[in-house]
Image (tube, grey):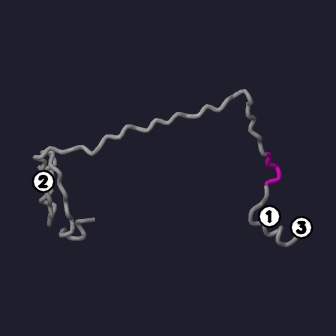
Amino acid sequence: MGVLDKMKNFIAPVDDDYDEEELEVEEDEIAVPVKYEQPQTKGVTKLASDTKMVLFEPRSFDEAEEVAKHLKERRAAVVNLHRLQREYAQ
């Protein structure tokens, strides 16, 4: 046993008592291919022509109530936090 082997065994000792178990495969079993059905995808949902989208650029959290009001009325709301102070935007 050389110096290199001693160092290798010191760093990562070899477990000589480990016995690998072999998996027993029964020959009577036949592999059956699994059928994969592709899920039916629905196209893009078309929105009604009267659908509104609202853009908000709040400067404080006091304006959150107005955003919530539009969301409750099922309107899309885009909230741009760019003008909000950095400490509040986090």
Q: Secondary structure at mark 1?
A: helix
Q: Residue at x 73, y 30 (%)?
A: 26
Work out which quarter of the rendered image holds the N terminus and state it: bottom right
* Label number found at residue 1: 3
Residue 67: say if magenta: no
Image position, residue 42 (x, y; %):
31, 40
Q: Residue at x 29, y 43 (%)?
A: 43
Disc 1 marks which amino acid? Asn
Quarter location, residue 90: bottom left
The residue lying furthest to the bottom in this view is 3
* Label number found at residue 65: 2
Q: Secondary structure at mark 3?
A: loop
76 lies left or right of 40? left
85 lies left or right of 33? left
Q: CA distance from mark 3 to mark 1?
A: 10 Å
Q: Nearer the viewer, residue 10 or 77?
A: 77
Q: Secondary structure at mark 2?
A: helix
